[in-house]
């Protein structure tokens, strides 16, 4: 089991380190003088960090160690660039870890039970009959619910841990509620429903049965916006819901990455105030989660 000082969250000063990590990415890169070096992305339950090896035989090390393998690294934590507040590891040696506690490497959501309660409270707060029917079709389905509360929200960029989708969704709901307070013209019930449903496609986008979160084949081919919109459209086809409302909900999923010109995956520009608000709430949650990681 790792000691408390050996977890990535505590890497905030230059010092020597010998500790175990989960290998999640590996690359051979080149310096400005065209010399190859090894760059790893490694993980423990508190976060990710880059580790680099400039000496030795990087290609041999690259081939020896596999993704999803627990390794021990001996090296130095260093702040780079200096005074930037960003830390990485300069590797001296790497060797396989024979004994370890798997729980040291699985990233999970914090305050999980509190977030489950907030999700349920949010669902209970939606009083519009038609919107309740839509939400019940998803969140009262045990298979969907179990996947939703376990799924990550991303592979790398934000909320990339088990339960991350739950946390991200709750954050987006909170931001949407705040926007509704500021702009009472917004349809709060529609906006909150859109927030709850905007990333449902992610339950089919990522594989996370192992310690590694990865984009699966369906996610690579279709992306979570299309998958989510398709899931919603399939549910709505069997529900007695107003046609205009159906279109608005699907529109909010397809446009929640903002204008098409941004190149972030939206297939249509957000065209109703609630879709615009949802886009910015989603963007704030994603960017601040990454910036404050």
Image (spheres, rainbow, N blue to C red):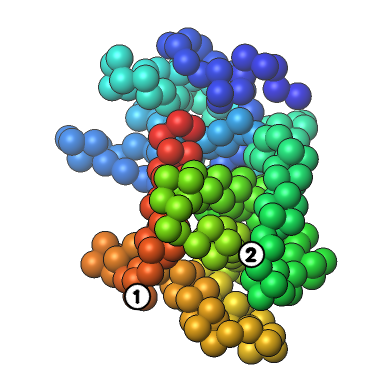
Q: In the rendered image, is residue 217 in sight?
A: no
Q: Which residue is mark 1?
A: 268
Of mark 1 and mark 2, the one earlier in the sequence is 2
Look at the numbered disc 1 and give the secondary structure of its residue.
Answer: loop
* Res 203 label: 2
Rendered location of residue 79, percent (x, y) = 37, 18
Q: Nearer the viewer, residue 262 or 101?
A: 262
The image quarter containing residue 9 is top right
Q: Could you tell me residue 283's position as x and y percent?
A: 40, 50
Q: Residues within 10 Å of mark 2 (few under 14, many from 20)?
A: many
Q: Residue 31 at x, y = what percent?
A: 24, 36
Q: CA distance from mark 1 to mark 2?
A: 22 Å
Front position in the image: 218 or 285: 285
Would residue 23 appear left or right of 36 to someone viewing this image? Answer: right
**Front in this rendered view, residue 72 or 210:** 210
Say which mark, if any, is on residue 226.
Answer: none
Position of 76 with respect to 214 (left or right) is left
Label 1 vs label 2, nearer the camera: 1
Give how far across and how far down residue 249 sits, in percent. Answer: 52, 74
Can you tell which quarter of the image residue 185 is in? bottom left
Residue farthest to the front, as pictured: 184
Tell me the residue at 46%/69% (across/down): 252
Q: Please identify the quadrant where the N terminus is shown.
A: top right
Quadrant in the picture for residue 95: top right
Residue 92 seen in the figure: yes
Looking at the image, which residue is at 48% across and 32% down? 293
């Amino acid at each position: 089991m790792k000691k408390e000082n050996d977890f990535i969250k505590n890497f905030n000063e230059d010092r020597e380190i010998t500790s175990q990590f989960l290998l999640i990415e590996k690359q051979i890169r080149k310096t400005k003088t065209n010399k190859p070096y090894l760059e790893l992305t490694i993980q423990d339950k508190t976060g990710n960090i880059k580790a680099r090896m400039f000496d030795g035989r990087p290609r041999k090390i690259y081939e020896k160690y596999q993704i999803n393998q627990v390794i021990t690294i001996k090296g130095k934590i260093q702040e780079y660039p200096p005074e930037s507040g960003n830390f990485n590891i300069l590797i001296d040696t790497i060797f396989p870890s024979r004994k370890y506690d798997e729980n040291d490497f699985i990233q999970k959501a914090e305050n999980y039970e509190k977030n489950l309660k907030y999700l349920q409270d949010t669902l209970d707060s939606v009083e519009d009959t038609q919107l309740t029917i839509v939400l019940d079709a998803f969140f009262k389905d045990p298979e969907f619910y179990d996947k939703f509360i376990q799924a990550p929200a991303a592979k790398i960029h934000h909320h990339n841990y088990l339960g991350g989708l739950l946390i991200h969704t709750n954050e987006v709901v909170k931001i949407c509620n705040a926007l509704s307070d500021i702009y009472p013209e917004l349809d709060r019930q529609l906006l909150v429903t859109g927030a709850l449903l905007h990333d449902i496609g992610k339950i089919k986008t990522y594989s996370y049965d192992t310690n590694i979160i990865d984009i699966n084949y369906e996610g690579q081919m279709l992306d979570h916006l299309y998958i989510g919109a398709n899931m919603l459209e399939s549910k709505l086809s069997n529900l007695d819901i107003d046609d205009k409302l159906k279109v608005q909900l699907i529109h909010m999923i397809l446009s929640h990455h903002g204008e098409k010109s941004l190149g972030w995956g939206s297939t249509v520009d957000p065209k109703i105030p609630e879709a615009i608000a949802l886009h910015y709430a989603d963007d704030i949650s994603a960017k601040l989660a990454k910036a404050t990681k």
